[in-house]
Amino acid sequence: MNKKQIAQTAIGAIALGLIVFWLFSKGPVAGKVIGIIANALILASMVISFVAEEKRKKDTR
């Protein structure tokens, strides 16, 4: 695995942990903040994946 794949996997693991914590948290404000952070991490992971795929396509041409 290269560095981007490792970073993407780590971001996904952190986001998964935050989502699980979000499901079981009791405070409404804490839950909203954790949900926003988890969703932002998922979005970042997807952007990293998209950029890497576009770069791979460009390099193979």
Image: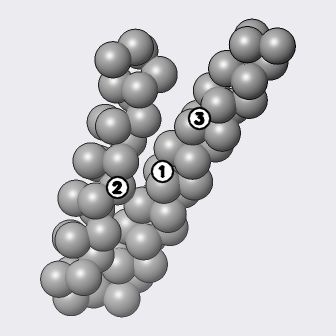
Q: Which residue is mark 3?
A: 48
Mark 1: which secondary structure?
A: helix
Q: Is there any visible trace of residue 5 in the rendered image?
A: yes
In the picture, the disc for residue 15 is 2
Residue 34 picture location, percent across and down: 38, 67
Contact (Cβ within 8 Å) of mark 2 with mark 1: yes
Residue 46 picture location, percent across and down: 57, 47
**In the depicted view, which residue is nearer to us: 29 or 40?**
40
Q: Amino acid at mark 2?
A: Ala
Q: Residue furthest front?
A: 61
Q: Which of marks 3 and 1 precedes in the sequence?
A: 1
Q: Is there any visible trace of residue 44 in the rendered image?
A: no
**In the depicted view, which residue is nearer to us: 14 or 34?**
14
Residue 17 picture location, percent across and down: 22, 58
In the picture, the disc for residue 59 is none
Mark-to-mark CA distance, 2 and 1:
6 Å
State the residue at coordinates (33%, 37%).
9
Mark-to-mark CA distance, 1 and 3:
10 Å
Split into 4 quadrants, where in the image is the N terminus? top left
Q: Amino acid at mark 1?
A: Leu
Mark 1 neighbour class, 10 Å CA radius: few under 14, some 14 to 19, many 20 or more? many
Residue 52 picture location, percent across and down: 62, 26
Mark 2: which secondary structure?
A: helix
Q: Which residue is mark 1?
A: 41
Mark 2 neighbour class, 10 Å CA radius: few under 14, some 14 to 19, many 20 or more? many
**In the depicted view, which residue is nearer to us: 59 or 16?**
59
Q: Which of marks 1 and 2 precedes in the sequence?
A: 2
The relative height of residue 52 versus residue 19 in the rendered view (above or below) is above
